[in-house]
Amino acid sequence: MSTRPGSKSILLVVDVQVGVVSSVWERDRIVGNVALAVSRARAADVPVVWVQHDDEQLKRDSPEWQWVPELGLELDETRVYKNFNSAFEGTELLEVLDKMEVSHIYLAGAATNWCIRATAYAALERGFDVTLLSDAHTTVDMELAPDRVVEARMAIDDLNAAMRWLSYPGRVNCVALAKEVSFGAS
């Protein structure tokens, strides 16, 4: 189990912002699954922590920077602001989670091949158990060259497979569906 002190869980929702998810693969279904995860976490008394990105393309307080309205962010829930892919880099997230005595992170959001991957690996490297909600993260197709495209679905499948089979000492990582995840269980 986790190598972190503490025994609590949180749902970490990363970058499900208007400008981030406007053209992602299966936007409505994935955002619906994130909203379902938020609702289920709240019902299980598992806190929701919101991580929100801003940079030169996604300016703080712009319409694109806002959370998608389907998620129903509550004002008393913890928010962390980031400028890098990993929610841990250059933020107070680790201190927030330590204060909350968190050892297990349920992870959802966007974009799979950037911020979700970086945050999942950073959490594992810091000793957290991680459950990736396999149907609650998404991305866009990425054109590398005119004849080379990394399809969003492939990036999602790749991270789901990695989180199923990665191995870190003293940690548990896995994937679960938003409608089936057992919040609070390792």
Image (tube, grey):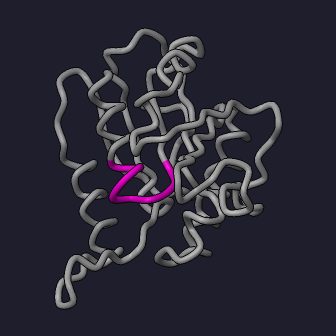
Residue 82, how many percent across, how many down?
52, 38
In the rendered structure, the answer to whether residue 23 lies left or right of residue 168 reads: right
In the rendered structure, the answer to whether residue 20 lies left or right of residue 135 reads: right
- Magenta span covers which residues? 108-117
Q: Residue at x 78, y 53 (%)?
A: 72
Residue 12, how many percent across, how many down?
54, 40
**Quadrant where the N terminus is found in the figure:** top left
Q: Residue at x 67, y 63 (%)?
A: 64
Residue 157, how many percent across, how many down?
29, 66
How many numbered marks appear? 0
In the rendered structure, the answer to whether residue 168 lies left or right of residue 91 reads: left
Residue 30, how many percent across, how many down?
55, 68
Residue 47 highlighted magenta (yes or no):
no
> Is the stretch drawn in magenta largely helix, strand or loop?
helix
Q: Observer-nearest residue: 135 or 55?
A: 55
Q: Observer-nearest residue: 78 or 179?
A: 78
Q: Furthest-front residue in view?
A: 56
In the rendered structure, the answer to whether residue 134 lies left or right of residue 127 reads: right
Q: Residue at x 49, y 74 (%)?
A: 24
Q: Furthest-right residue in view?
A: 75
**Quadrant where the C terminus is found in the figure:** top left
Quarter of the image where one finds residue 81: top right
